[in-house]
Image: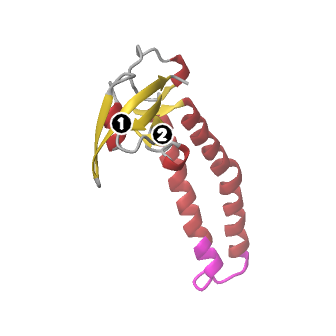
Amino acid sequence: MATIPITKRGAEKLKAELHQLKTVERPSIIQAIAEARAQGDLSENAEYESAKDRQGFIEGRIMEVEGKLSAAQIIDPSSLDAGGRVVFGTTVELEDEDSGAAVTYQIVGEDEADIKLGLINISSPIARALIGKEEGDTAVVQAPGGERRYEIVAVKYI
């Protein structure tokens, strides 16, 4: 199985979700199923069907998170030394060459990506354009609205 890169913060988030699913969600759904069973006829019991559906979702998510964690290659950006190059986990300050707007992104794994928080997926067009570049380089991104050019202002390993 191929490894999946994930930051230390992302791995901790997945571990917390797994703990929540196993210690809170799973026991509560087991209790809900038991209560629905106690009501009698299961063939016309909507609460029972709903609880069973929820149980299937929870068990599926537990398996998915466990699989991701077992295949994870945890990378701590603060321990990286890539010689000033942009790699997975780095935080990059960019300046749009057309508008002059400054943006800061951290390149993270698929499960961690959230553009509103400045976390971009390693496989996104902008991340692919940045990988391997250094401070002062220009990254050309093929965006849906056309070509965009960004100057790399700073590369940080935080």
Q: Label 2 is placed on what type of residue? A: Val
- Above or below, comparing residue 139 to residue 113 in the picture: above
- Above or below, comparing residue 123 to residue 42 in the picture: above
> Picture coordinates of residue 94 (x, y %)?
43, 34
- Above or below, comparing residue 7 to residue 82 in the picture: below
| Magenta residue check for 46 | yes
Residue depicted at x 58% and y 65%:
54
Pointers 1 and 2 in contact (C-beta within 8 Å) = yes
> Picture coordinates of residue 147 (x, y %)?
26, 46
Total numbered labels: 2
Q: Quadrant of the N terminus?
A: top left
**Would you name the residue on which mark 2 appears?**
103
Tell me which segment is drawn in magenta: 38-50
In the image, 143: left or right of 90?
A: left
Residue depicted at x 37% and y 23%:
136
SS at badge 2: strand
Mark 2 neighbour class, 10 Å CA radius: few under 14, some 14 to 19, many 20 or more: some
Q: Label 1 is placed on what type of residue? A: Tyr
In the image, 19: left or right of 102?
A: right
| Magenta residue check for 5 | no
